[in-house]
Image: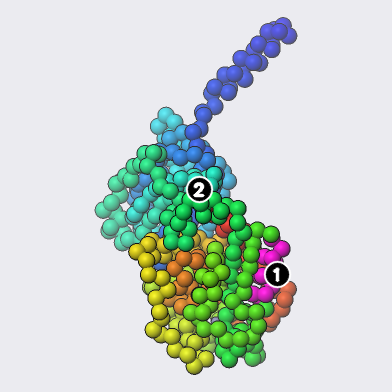
Amino acid sequence: MTKFGLKIFISWLFGTLLFAFPSFAAQIDGLRIGQNSTGARVVFDADANFDYKVFTLSNPNRLVIDTQNVEVTSKAVNSLQKNDFVSNVRTGPTGVSGVRIVFDLLRPIVVKKAFMLKPASGFAWRFAIDVETVTEKDFIAQVGNAYAFNSKDYQQSASSQSVAKSSSDSAKKNALRRRIITIDAGHGGIDPGAIGYSGTYEKNITFAMAKELKAELDKNPHYKVYLTRSRDIFIPLRDRVKISRKNNSDLFISIHADSARNRKATGLSVYTLSEEASDKEAAALAEKENKADIVAGIDFSKEEKLVSDVLLNMAQRETRNFSSEFAGLLSWQMSKIVKTVSNTHRFAGFAVLKAPDVPSVLMELGYLSNPTEEKQLKQKSYRQKLVAAAVRAINKYFENNKH
Ligand SMILES: [Zn+2]
């Protein structure tokens, strides 16, 4: 072959190769799961909207999403975090230009809703699937029922529908403004909280951790961080919620440390609000933490209504999903560096998590009743590890929710 002929051959080869590559209309490059007490939301990040069909299959139980002209990156597949709903995700071709995304289910579910969220302020598209836990019998009954949608049916960003962020103007500002984080050091003043194996007060551990977490977050110019208390004083639980709302917080983190009669009990846990507790331990813990006000001689059992608005329910549901998403990220980061309790993310009726419009989580750093964990929690170097993991979770959460 002449030099010229070779050139032609090469350009022909490359031309053919280029045409041989399928052109994708959209690329999915992120995947995350937020859990709550009754179900979960699966969210995909994509650079464009796309048509999809969602359905379930049995034997083994699977959740399936069929799409057209969509590329699912390995980054998206690999970003699946450990959760209670699906064990893994895989993709494969279907039809002429289709891609099938398959989740293996850990429990029977139904698809309640699937929808596309329009990008807010120039940020990516999100495709969300809300699922709810059901009995195996109910799962079987609806296997194969497809939830098919056209890419033209999409919603505005859910956050721009919520009470706090109602106009598109404020959504635009959201993209630019600093994220506001309120950190709540549990207990204080007259209320010492749990008392450790060798007499350590919970209120001192929570305060040290809160200050250290603030100091670390303050290094990031994109964050504005507040503490609910900056000294050893008593603040009623509902006032902590009020402070969080008054600060216009994007995230509220309440820090605690547990104690148990069983000195062997150890491990960190993360909680979000739910009327129904995920288990007896979580219910008992919420009851104990909610007694903080009574300890100080105040009884706010008849809580005043925080907000009265027809949109309240919607905002609460949305807030719960964000809280769950952050709790999942926090549990995951913590589980990588310290011992966590099984089912690290749990749910119960904590009074301090009741702001309807601020995603809120409560973290129990460990058990002060356990001599080893008490000693560790008193060490700044140990707390610094927890701080670093919390910062990673916070960064990831705001990266995921740029709208
Ligand atoms: Zn506490």
Report crowding for label 1: few under 14, some 14 to 19, many 20 or more residues within 10 A (C-alpha): few
Give the labeled residue for mark 2: 120
Is ligand 1 closer than 8 angstroms to the Cβ of mark 2? no
Instruction: Return the residue at label 1.
Output: 215
Tell me the quarter of the image containing the N terminus: top right
Indicate which disc, 2 or 1, sits on the residue closer to the N terminus: 2
Q: Where is residue 164 in the image (x, y as percent from the top left)?
A: 47, 62
Residue 8 relative to residue 26: left or right: right
Residue 34 x/y as whole percent? 47, 59
Q: Is mark 1 within 8 Å of ligand 1?
A: no
Residue 215 magenta: yes
User: What's the residue type where badge 1 is placed?
Assistant: Ala
Q: Where ligand 1 lies, by image quadrant?
A: bottom right
Numbered disc 2: secondary structure: loop
Q: Can residue 355 be seen in this view?
A: yes
In front of the other: label 2 or label 1? 2
- What is the basis of the colouring in this image? rainbow
Name the side, left or right, on which 316 lies relative to 228: left
Q: What element carries label 1?
A: helix
